[in-house]
Image: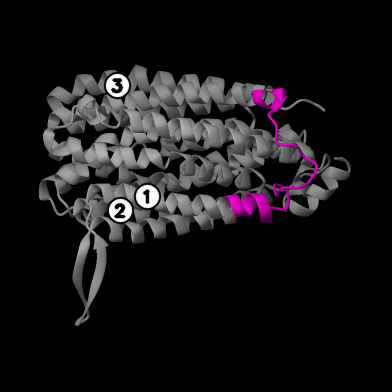
Amino acid sequence: MGRAGTDMAKEIQWSRFLAPDAKPSPGEQLGLVVRLSIPVILAEISSTIMSYADSAMVGSLGAAATASVGLVATTTWLFNGMGMCIVTGFSIQIAQLLGAGRLRQVQSVMRQAMMVCTAIGLLFAAAAAGISGFLPVWLGGGPEVCAGASRYFFIYGCGLPAVLLRQAGGSMLQCSGDMKTPSALNILMCVMNVGFNAFFIFPTRTVAVRGMRFTMYGLGTGVAGAALGTVMSEAVAMTLMMYFVCRRSPVLRLEKGIPWRLERGCMRTTVRLAVPIALERVTTSLAQIAGTKIVSPLGTTAVAANSLAVTAEGFCYMPGYGMAAATTTLVGQSIGAGRRDQAKRFAWLSVGVGVGVMTCTGVLMYIAAPWIFSMLTPDPAVQTLGAAVLRIEAFAEPLFAASIVAAGALRGAGDTLVPSIMELGSMWGVRIPLAMMLVGPLGLHGVWTAMCTDLCIRGLLFLLRMYRGRWLEIQTISAV
C-alpha cells in the first residue's frame, strides 16, 4: 500500500483485513460489521426516540398542528435527500481513496466537499424560502393547516445550509472509519432538538414535578417553534461536526499545502456518482409528495395518522441504516485496497444481519403499534388509524432491510446508477399506481398496503443486483 498506506494502517483498525494476503474468519468480519454499526444504530435509536418526543410535543397542540408538519415533511425529505446525494458522491471517493492509502487526495476531496455543500446549501435555502408560501396549498392542505405548514417550511428551509454541512461532515467521518464521533454528535443534536422545541413551541408555564412547582420558560410559537428547534439543533451539531472534521480527525483534518480548489477529476466522479442518486431521490420524493396529495383528501385525521406512522416506523428501520453506513465504509475501503473478495463477503454478511435484526424489530413494531401511538398523540381517531397502518408496514421490514443494507454496499463500490433506476421503477411503477387504485376502497390502509408491496419488490430487486455481482467490476477512482 506504500508509505501513505502504512500511515493509514495506524488509523484504520481493520486495515489488516485489507492486506493482499489477509483471510479473516467470518466471525472476525461479523465482529467488525457489528462494531462499526453499533454507534450508528445507537444514533438512529436516539433519533427515533427524539422524533417520538418531537411528534408528541407537536401532537399535543392538536391534529391540525401534526398535519401542518406532516404535510410538508415529504418536501423537506426532498431537500435533505438531494443534499445527501451530493455528500455521497464525495464520501464514496474518500472511502476508496483511504483504502488505497492516498491521504493527500482524501484531504483534497474533503475540501471540495465543504465548498460545494456550502454553495448548494445556500441555493437550497433560497429555493425553499421562495416556495414556502404556496407549497401547502399545492399539496392540498386545508385552511386549518396551510398557515402553520408554510411557516414551518420557511424556517426549516433557511436552516438547510447547516443541515447539508452537518450531513457532509458526518458522512465523511463515517467513511474515514470514525463511526463514534458523528453518532455521538447526532445523538446530542436529537437531545438539543427536544430541549429547543420545549422552549420554542410552548409558552411560559408552571410545571409540577413530585409536588414541586417551578416555572418553565418558553416562547409559545407553536408549529413554527418546532422548526426553530430543529434549525437551532442542526446549527450547533454542524459546528461541532466541522470542528471534528477540520481539527480532530487524523485523516481529514486540515493540513497545510493542500489547496482549496475544485478539481475536474474529483468533480466529474462526484457528478457521476451523485446524479443517478439525485435523479432517484428527486423522483422518489416527488412520488412521496404525490402520496401526500393522495392522502390529503382523506382529511386531517388521515394526514396526521400518516405523518405519525412514518415517524413511528423509524423504530423498525434504524438498525438497517446503521448496517448500511458500516457496509458503505467497509466495501468502499475494500474496493480501494483491491480486495473485491472482501467487499463481497462484507456486503452479504451485512445484508444477512440487517434482515435478521429488522425482522425482529418488525415483530416488535407490530405488537407495540397501539402503545406507540398512545405516546405520540392524544387523539383517539389518529391513534386507531395510525396503529392499523403501521401494522401493515411491519410485514415489509425484512425485505426493506435487504434494500437498505444492499444499497449501502452498492454505494461503497460506486454502483449508483442501476440501484437508483430500480428504486425509481419500484416507487413510480408500483407504489403510486397501487396507492391510487386502493385509496378509494381502502382509504389510508390502501396507501400503506401499496407502500408495503413496493418495499418488498424493491428488496428482491436489490438482492438480485447483488447476486449478479456486476457491482464489483465498477471503477470509481483512478489507478493513480
Q: Position of residue 180 (x, y in %)?
A: 58, 56
What residue lies at 33% left-to-right and 44% top-to-bottom? 313
Nearest to the observer: residue 171 or residue 319: 171
Residue 343 quadrant:
top right
The residue that label 3 is drawn on is 432
Left/right placement of residue 388 relative to residue 432 reads left
> Dots 2 and 1: beta carbons under 8 Å?
yes
Q: Height in image: 298 above or below 67?
A: above
Q: Position of residue 355 (x, y in %)?
A: 47, 41
Mark 3 and mark 1: span between their CA atoms? Answer: 30 Å
Element marked by disc 1: helix
Element marked by disc 3: helix
Location of the C terminus by quadrant is top right
Q: Position of residue 93 (x, y in %)?
A: 67, 33
The residue that label 1 is drawn on is 230
Q: Nearer the viewer, mark 3 or mark 1?
A: 1
* Mark drawn on residue 54: 2
Mark 2 and mark 1: span between their CA atoms? Answer: 10 Å
Left/right placement of residue 59 relative to residue 3 reads left
Left/right placement of residue 269 relative to residue 405 reads right
